[in-house]
Image: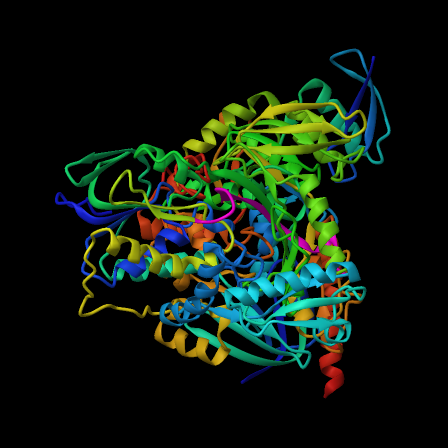
Amino acid sequence: MESRELVIVGAGPAGMAAALSAYRKGIKDILLLERDQYLGGILNQCIHPGFGLHHFKEDLTGPEYADRFIKEIEGIKGIEVSLKSFVVHLTGNKVLTYLKPGKLAEVKAKALIMATGCRERTREMVHIPGTRPAGIYPAGLAQKMINIEGWLPGKEVVIVGSGDIGLIMARRFTLEGARVKAVVEIQKESRGLIRNVAQCIEDFEIPLYFLHRILRIYGQDRVEKVTVENIETKESFDITCDTVLISVGLIPENDLVEMAGVELDKATNCPRSVEPIPGIFICGNAYKVYDLVDWVTRDSEKAGKMAAEYIKGLK
Amino acid sequence: MIKKLTCIECPKGCQLEVETDGSHVIRVTGNQCEKGVTYAQQEIEDPRRILTSTILTKGLAVKMLPVRTSVPIPKAKLKEAMDEVKKIRLSGPVEAGTVILRDLLDTGADLIATRRAG
Amino acid sequence: MPLPRPSPYDVLIIGGGVTGAAIARELSRYRLKIALLEKEEELAFGVSKSNSGIIHPGTQNPPDSLKGKLCVQGNILTRRLAKELGVDFREVGELIVIFKDDEMPELLKIKKEAEELGVPRLEIVDGKWLTINEPNLNKEALAALYAPTAGIISPYRLVYDLSENAQNNGVEIFLSHRVTGILRKTGTYEVQTDKIPFKSRFVINAAGLFADEVSRLVGGDDYTIKPRKGEEYLLDKKLENITRHLLFPLPSPTSKGILVIKTADGNPMIGPTAEDFDNKGDTATSDAGLNKVLENAQKLVPSISGRDIIAYFAGLRPVAGNDFIIRHLDKSPGFIDVAGIQSPGLTAAPAIALMVADLLKRNGLELKKKLFFKKHRRPSVHLFAIPFEKTRKLIKKDPAYGEIVCRCEMVSAKEVRDAIKRGAHTLDGIKFRTRAQAGRCHGGFCTTRVMKIMAEELKLKTTEITKRGKGSEIVKDSRDGK
């Protein structure tokens, strides 16, 4: 079994900030595990600007924000980056098991930082009655398809939920030549930034329905239409479409810490503290869902410092 | 007349009230900083947007390279700009910040890479 | 896909669900030329994919029914089949639970009828037994009928493993071939499809929801298949051990009721509803269905909450009256109906297959055993089901076992490629075989990865990759045209 001072799971903005912060505090043996084939996490698919206004005092796109940290990490020998590395097991004693092509490894860490981000709430988790055709995607998956793979998931889109990801994708689809026929929001105002409503919805004159919900999805093999209902008046109308995008929230990914014995809040899936087990720290979206990456960086740097203090305290 | 705008310069999204004669700005209220005023002026006289998109690469490790315009371009040219962007096939390696195309559609804006691709 | 033989087949099976696949595998023991036609893009895409995966002990069937006899037989045969094919079968036992004293006579009646059928080791257990052995069951439960021989299996993995073994023993399978007509010419059937015609001496109608329509093609007109919809709701895998047995209420006239069950993949499942519909294509779920299922499931296990639901679907039971219709259609010699195979059809499948073989024999088909029948199948690898030490050895042999594609279910790229080699060529086909896309994030992480592997292995354009066949393409356009 390998022994490391600090192991960080996830090399998105949280993991990278934590790694750099711990390094600057004197920890020179850091293993940074990332399941994708590049660093940067979700920022790689967030190609729009709005990142770094606080941290860098610049308006950067997601990849540009990530690039600042990636460049720093690549210059540091004490931070070992392991890509395509997937943690499958974690114990409360800080023993991790991870898989990568050609290898299954066990590592014992003095301290651990979990920066595992979020997963999206899917159609399956929110009951939208109807059939289960192709064409129903969580907004982040559609974003990955378009921005990372260059695939257009659909041509006539209805978006469920007016959170930031849904709003951003309304613009993205429109720019790619698709028609966004509606954004349907069950609450009385947008869950996302007002700025995004302006530059993603109003700019393109996309109908935004508040206090509405999707009553039913139709289509046997591919989405054909949806019925939309005004939740107050109960009036409903149909919108033909071939795609339904689901943007109804994020869920912190904490399966691993749960495995290690950490109790999560049942409603939010969040841990109850940054250090739920001595020496195991959680930062970034895995700790709580942030609205700006700048705050992720700020808090993850703190977590990196705390991990460094913890390790130094062991000696 | 009074036009209501959301400032998009930063995530705050201040709700601006802009007194205008149709083509010029007389007064701006609701802004929390100077950027709101310049935004309002620009938006009334000549609305512009930063365009972000992706371009296809050839033979690079990153299949779709994210790009942005260096400065905002006229809102009315967004669609045309997208058509131009879709035509590009990038084969050489780039760093974040590398200029892919100079002066996109005579707007004065360059198209720059926002990510390294080797 | 091969072209059909010019000379007639001995047996042509219409329908590639668990019934058709079990029959194909059974007949592949004999020296026969066998073809199986399936109208969907992959096997099990009809009725079988919505199956609960329960191997019933045989309770709740009339003593003189085919359902009852074949279920009891099937319960035993499935265990052996599972070993031979390398598919997991787990015996978990079932409890039919009552809450009131006046329900006891019905429970005893169920017990008696089951014993007449030969269901073994039944016993009535009391509240104390239930508290110890089923701790999350509603404390108000009075008693239950305990049938220890109930089990769980993956219904679609069973279909794929049966059919793979059948193919290995010479059965030819034709996917996306829908039967459009059947003619009888001098002792041979000509079965017309939307693609090419097939000739066969015997025809087995295992066409699920459409068995009545197929039967009508040869003049069989004495039954109709009425779809009875069942909505099912899957719970988070975290609750895998919320129950130890399959929990049943007392049955209703049209169904065994809304259950709280365990599934072979670990997720508990609640449901199904039972609603008669006219439309053989209507598999929509509904708010009313969700509420009914949740309400009834909570009667059995009060701690279940709506928040635990992570997925849902609906299936259609092919109902043809009260019993299976398994018979030689005398007015059309050589044609065998295997219709109305609703619950306990999965359990009964291997027994149905034996009965069909017997019917064929009695109606003129010579069954000569092959010298070499490959009865075993090399089991598929599922990383999530094996200890890390074994995974380490596998990775040494093939590094691609270390490349994780689906994070929720821990599925490697190698497993996905193997599934494709074994016949999967749609996203659903890969999901049913490997569990990739079936976990908590429902494909949010792995869909693009799985699609890229499919494009590579199947030489498809991204725009040609489907969820479950033509019409269900995932992506409308691709920047690089690939």
The answer to which of A9 and C384 lies nearer the viewer is C384
Which residue is most to the bottom? A315
The quarter of the picture where residue C159 lies is bottom left
Question: Is residue C307 part of the magenta span, yes or no?
Answer: yes
Residue at figure coordinates x 79%, y 28% from the top left: B37
Give the quadrant of the C terminus of chain C: top left
Residue at figure coordinates x 74%, y 59% from the top left: C103
The quarter of the picture where residue A209 lies is top right
The answer to which of B35 and A4 lies nearer the viewer is A4
* Residue C267 screen position, x and y as percent: 60, 61
Question: Is residue C386 part of the magenta span, yes or no?
Answer: no
Image position of C363 (left or right of C450): left
Q: Is residue A244 above or below residue C58?
A: above
* Residue B115 screen position, x and y as percent: 52, 49
Q: Is residue C121 above or below residue C455?
A: below
* Residue A309 screen position, x and y as percent: 75, 77
Q: Is residue C309 visible?
A: yes
Q: Give, as a single range, the part of the protein colored magenta.
A: C303-324
Which residue is most to the left? C7
Q: Is residue C61 above or below residue A220?
A: below
Residue at figure coordinates x 66%, y 77% from the top left: A27
The answer to which of A283 and C306 lies nearer the viewer is C306
The answer to which of C71 and A267 lies nearer the viewer is C71
